[in-house]
Image: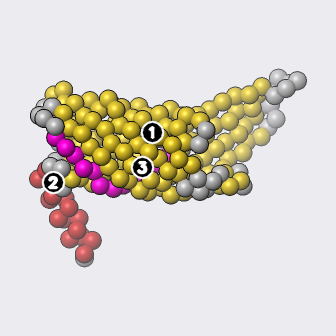
Amino acid sequence: MSIALVLVFTGSAFSQHGAQIFGGYSYQRTGGEGVNGFNASVTGDITPWVGITGDFALHSKGTSVLLPNSSTLLNADAKLLSFMFGPQFTSHVNDATSMFVHILAGGYRASGSVASSGLGISVNSSGTGFSTATGGGVDFRVAPRIAVRPVQIDWIHLGNTSLFGADMGSSNGFRYSGGIVVRF
């Protein structure tokens, strides 16, 4: 019952102040390597300055290696899916420009695969862990309901997980995102 009341009042708060959807390119560097991907978020505004954000990102990387003294090709792929939620605070600099900061927490799922048709092997592994992001960005309105987000920078923490039976440890790094914002 109490969850239903919270959803009703939260929904009415969002409808009074609006919402926004963001989607675009993302580059994340945690640990030692950088990976390309996609970042998307949905923010429901509670007030003109405070909202609740759900942030989702998928980054992936693949590589192929020719085994020495052989014609056997080994393919390795890695994916990182993060899902975080938290408050977002927005400052409307003027009618066309707004800046925001957010503090997000949630989880991530890392997965990896190694395969070789020449050797007849295929091995997959995945693990989950805790993740946080702290950062912000700037939006420039280009139409009444459309904005461009040229920069969003987040400091990312990925908690401990294991892949292929090995402890991967935790890592810190940054994520850049840029794309389009649609406001409702």
Considering only vertical position in the picture, is 116 above or below 18? Answer: above
Quick check: can you spot residue 34?
A: yes
Q: Is residue 45 left or right of residue 136?
A: left
Residue 38 in view of the camera: no
Magenta span includes 7: no
Q: Which quarter of the rendering shows the C terminus? A: top left
**Position above or below: 57 against 139:** below
> Which amino acid type is marked by label 2?
Thr
Which residue matches tag 2?
Answer: 47
Magenta stretch secondary structure, dominant? strand
74 horizontally vs 60: left or right? right
Residue holding disc 3: 133
Q: Which residues are magenta?
A: 81-92
- Residue at position x 23%, y 43% from top? 20
Q: Amino acid at mark 1?
A: Arg
Could you tell me which residue is drawn at 15 percent across and 49 percent down?
48
Q: Are marks 1 and 2 in contact (CB under 8 Å)?
A: no
Q: Are marks 1 and 3 in contact (CB under 8 Å)?
A: yes
Closer to the chain start, of discs 1 and 2, is 2
Q: According to the image, label 1 marks what residue?
A: 175
Where does the N terminus fall, quadrant-wise? bottom left
- Is 89 contained in the magenta span? yes
In this view, the residue in front, 117 or 181, is 181
Q: Residue furthest right?
A: 69
Location of residue 60 by image quarter: top right
Q: Quadrant of residue 140?
A: top left
Q: Residue at the spot x=29%, y=55% of the render?
A: 87
| Helix, strand or loop for disc 1 | strand
Residue 131: percent from the left, percent from the top? Answer: 48, 54
